[in-house]
Image (spheres, rainbow, N blue to C red):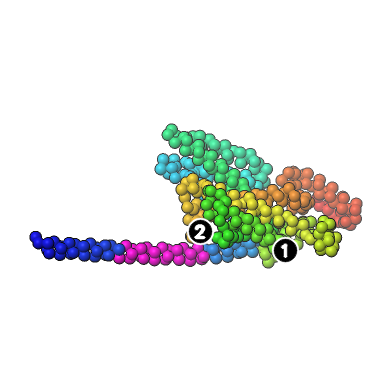
Amino acid sequence: MSATEDGKSTTLTSSNEVELTNAESNSSSSKEIVSGGNEREKKKQTFIVRTIWTLIMTFLLFATLTAGQFWTIVAVLILQVLVFRECINITSQKAKLENLRYTNLLNWWFLTTTIFYLDGRNLIKYFLSNFIVSDYTSAIAIKLILQHKFITYLMYVTGFVGFVASLRKGTLKFQFAQLCITHMTLLLVILQGHCIIRNIMHGMFWFVVPAGLVVINDIFAYLCGITFGKTQLISISPKKTVEGFVGAWIFTTLSSVLFAYIFANMSYFICPVNDNIYTNFFSVVECDPNPIFIPQIYRLPSFLVDILHQEYIQVKPVYFHTIIIAMFASLIAPFGGFFASGLKRCFKLKDFGDTIPGHGGITDRMDCQFLMGSFAYLYYETFISISHAHVGKFIQSIILNLEPADIITLIKSLVSYLFKIGAITEEVYTTIFQLL
């Protein structure tokens, strides 16, 4: 072959290689464009779904709060059961693989036992007051109330015996680990969920304000984080920054003052649940407010007197309490979220579930609320609660603890007392005694 032919051959080969390279480059670019387009479309769809479900959740929240304490309590009960299900599901996959049929059943049995222990007595009292009319059913309900703790104990022992009977060689480590996980979930979710229910009974203020401050803190932690965030806060959640944490603390504290100003002036929010649990936002609610909702006069420190030119200030104590609650919501409650993040990383999960499209699981939205709810409950019981003599509770106690003959004796004593102080006439006094 001549040198000319060799040159032509080399030129053709180089030309073909260039064409192949260009084709591959064009193909790669096309794939990148398609991939980029798909990614943008996917993000767009996720954003739309997330926005729609955010609006749905916001509507459901306001609808529930407006509906009243009863439906708010029902919502909390449902949410804590869903959170329990999500937490148990991420740890119980092996039970399905190993065909441990009773593991899931035992988890739900312990859940039922715990809810019955914490809320069963009040639920039975509620049904006794509002729905139960027959004497036979009432007698059963009263027996359940009186023997509530012992029945709960028998339920727990039944679950314990069932667990021991289900133990199987080769899976012992998993089964005992599952039992511990179940009890920890009951402690962290159901027990603290019970505290949230008690907050609702104390007045919607003690449910709305703590929960609202957690939401505010979460929003401003995100906004301050993306705006100023540079310093990582905690390794388990790399996106959390010190700047976001501090910024959220400041804005949450300021928001607490606004929350107190709005809700402390509304009877629906500050009045506790008494006999009528069916009250709603549109009901006429009246009560003697807790002293923290009544303006008090405080003497100012000397350095403020020089600035403000006044020695005293009148303010409702609730403002100081909400600031303390805000401190917890911004400085401590987020660690409930960090704990949840650590748990997800432990099981290599992005979300606890897909219950809420675009948002993940219920647990992903509630991880800080349980810790906040338990703090609000204990803070209220320790520093705010005052003892009220409530007629409905006295009557329930009398019905549950006294025999009919003792109740008649009590009525006679009360009638005699009312006659002596002049609250009833002699005619009424005589008539009642004749009837008895």
Left or right: residue 229 compared with residue 268: left
On the rendered image, what quadrant is the N terminus found in? Answer: bottom left
Q: Residue at x 81, y 49 (%)?
A: 411
Q: Secondary structure at mark 2?
A: loop
| Residue 165, horizontal then vertical, whole percent | 49, 34
In the depicted structure, whether residue 105 falls above or below residue 75:
above
Q: Along the line of sight, which residue is nearer the eye, 218 or 316?
A: 218
Query: Residue 156, image x and y in percent?
Result: 58, 39
Number of the label disc, if any, that sits on residue 261: 1
Q: Quadrant of residue 297?
A: bottom right
Q: Is residue 167 above or below residue 49?
A: above
- Looking at the picture, tell me which residue is in the foreground, 234 or 322: 234
- Residue type at the position of mark 1: Tyr
In the rendered picture of this protein, how many numbered marks are placed on residues? 2
Left/right placement of residue 175 relative to residue 375 reads left
Which residues are drawn in magenta? 26-52
The residue at 46%/35% (across/down) is: 172
Residue 39 among magenta residues = yes
The disc placed on residue 20 is none
**Residue at numbered disc 2:** 359
